[in-house]
Amino acid sequence: VQLQASGGGVVQAGGSLTLSCKASGRTFGTTGVGWFRQAPGKEREFVGFITWSGYTTFQDSVQGRFTISRDKVRGMVTLQMNSLKPEDSAVYYCAATRAPGSGVTTTGAYDFWGQGTLVTVSS
């Protein structure tokens, strides 16, 4: 499975940005796609997750501001980020998992990773 993230950029605080993750290859063997982010000097942290059937879960700090959707046919997962804050600035990564169990919030649950896309939120 190959993942290609795109859509990062610079946005002012309070603005919105949409990130996309294109999955290709043997995606039928995966359960869903998660989004993580990593700010300079910090560990990679969980942002949100969506199963191919549409179930979603989010980190508390983005709940209500971020949404995730998926297009199973196209193998596309979209992270819509609204009401962005400077602390949302980070490199964002998408990742796919074959069998996350109960650990969708941990990086170890994911089998495939895309390259990151940089999001910068200016104050």
Image (spheres, rainbow, N blue to C red):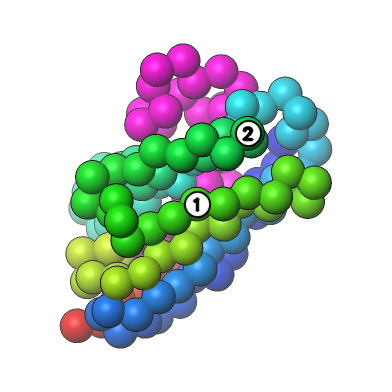
Q: Quadrant of residue 48?
A: top left
Q: Is residue 85 above or below residue 59?
A: below
x, y percentage for residue 117?
49, 62
Per the image, the residue denoted by label 1 is 68
Q: Is residue 96 above or below residue 69?
A: above
Element on which disc 2 rests = loop
How many marks can you see? Answer: 2
Q: Nearer the viewer, residue 116 or 14?
A: 14
Per the image, the residue denoted by label 2 is 53
Residue 103 colored in magenta in the image: yes
Instruction: Name the residue at 63% across, 49% down.
Output: 70
Q: As shown in the figure, which amino acid type bears the numbered disc 2?
A: Ser
x, y percentage for residue 68?
50, 52
Residue 88 colored in magenta in the image: no
Element on which disc 1 rests = strand
x, y percentage for residue 102?
40, 17
Instruction: Name the residue at 47% across, 63% down.
Output: 80
x, y percentage for residue 110?
51, 28
- Rounded to the nearest whole Å, what is the CA distance between mark 2 and mark 1? 12 Å
Classed neighbour count for the residue bearing mark 2: other residues with Cα under 10 Å, few (<14), some (14–19), many (≥20) = few
Q: Is residue 41 above or below residue 121?
A: above
Quadrant position of the C terminus in the picture: bottom left
Classed neighbour count for the residue bearing mark 1: other residues with Cα under 10 Å, few (<14), some (14–19), many (≥20) = many
Nearer-N-terminus badge (2/1): 2
Is residue 44 visible in the rendered structure shown here?
Answer: no
The span picked out in magenta is 90-115
Quadrant position of the N terminus in the picture: top right
Is residue 80 visible in the rendered structure shown here?
Answer: yes
